[in-house]
Image (cartoon, rainbow, N blue to C red):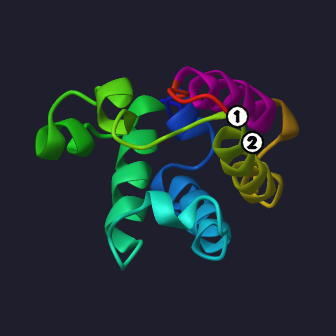
Amino acid sequence: MSEPQPTTMYDLVGGAPFFEALVARFYAGVASDPLLRPLYPEEDLGPAQARLTGFLIQYWGGPDDYSQARGHPRLRMRHNPYPIGTAARDHWLTHMRAALDAAHAPDRLKDFIWEYFERTATAMMNHPG
């Protein structure tokens, strides 16, 4: 019998290592961003990095460890306490674009993931400016 073909984006990009590296690169940019860094109340970005990694792994078809640990993602509710306007969204997208551009995956897959990030970042906006 032949090996089963990958059926999820999680499988297609190579599983957890893809998302772990993507999010590590993203938070490396956030760490020195004067607009975004203050939105993360924890001194150490490690917990935020772990949460985003777990969420993305689950969202794209990997194990559901994120929901097992934190419950339903409720993205809007979880982001509501932080003022996210156009500038914050654009900074977030800039760091995620750089992280995704450096990722090892076919461009068509990265394009698909990017469309999700653009939609979701805009949906998290809750503040003018």
Q: Which residue lies at the image location 16% right of the left edge and 42% below the top edge?
A: 70
Around disc 1, counting alpha carbons within 10 Å, would you say few (fewer than 14), some (14 to 19), or many (20 or more)? some
Above-or-below relation of 73 to 31: above
Q: Is residue 58 left or right of residue 89?
A: left
Q: Which residue lies at the image location 68% right of the left edge and 69% below the top edge?
A: 29
Inspect the image, locate mark 2, and give the three-letter code of the amino acid beneath it.
Answer: Asp
Q: Give the structural element (helix, strand or loop) at label 2.
A: helix
x and y percentages locating residue 48 in the rendered image:
38, 60
Q: Examine the image and state in which quarter residue 9 appears.
A: top right
Disc on res. 90: 2
Q: Which residue lies at the image location 30% right of the left edge and 28% below the top edge?
A: 77
Q: Examine the image and state in which quarter residue 68 appears.
A: top left
- Can residue 121 be found in the magenta stretch? yes
Inspect the image, locate mark 1, and give the three-letter code of the amino acid beneath it.
Answer: Thr
Q: Examine the image and state in which quarter residue 57 appears.
A: top left
Q: Quadrant of the C terminus?
A: top right
> Is there a contact, CB below 8 Å, between mark 1 and mark 2?
yes
Disc on res. 86: 1
x and y percentages locating residue 71 in the rendered image:
15, 33
Around disc 2, counting alpha carbons within 10 Å, would you say few (fewer than 14), some (14 to 19), or many (20 or more)? some
**Magenta-highlighted residues:** 109-123
x and y percentages locating residue 52 in the rendered image:
42, 50
Main SS category, magenta section: helix
x and y percentages locating residue 93 in the rendered image:
72, 44
Above-or-below relation of 76 to 15: above
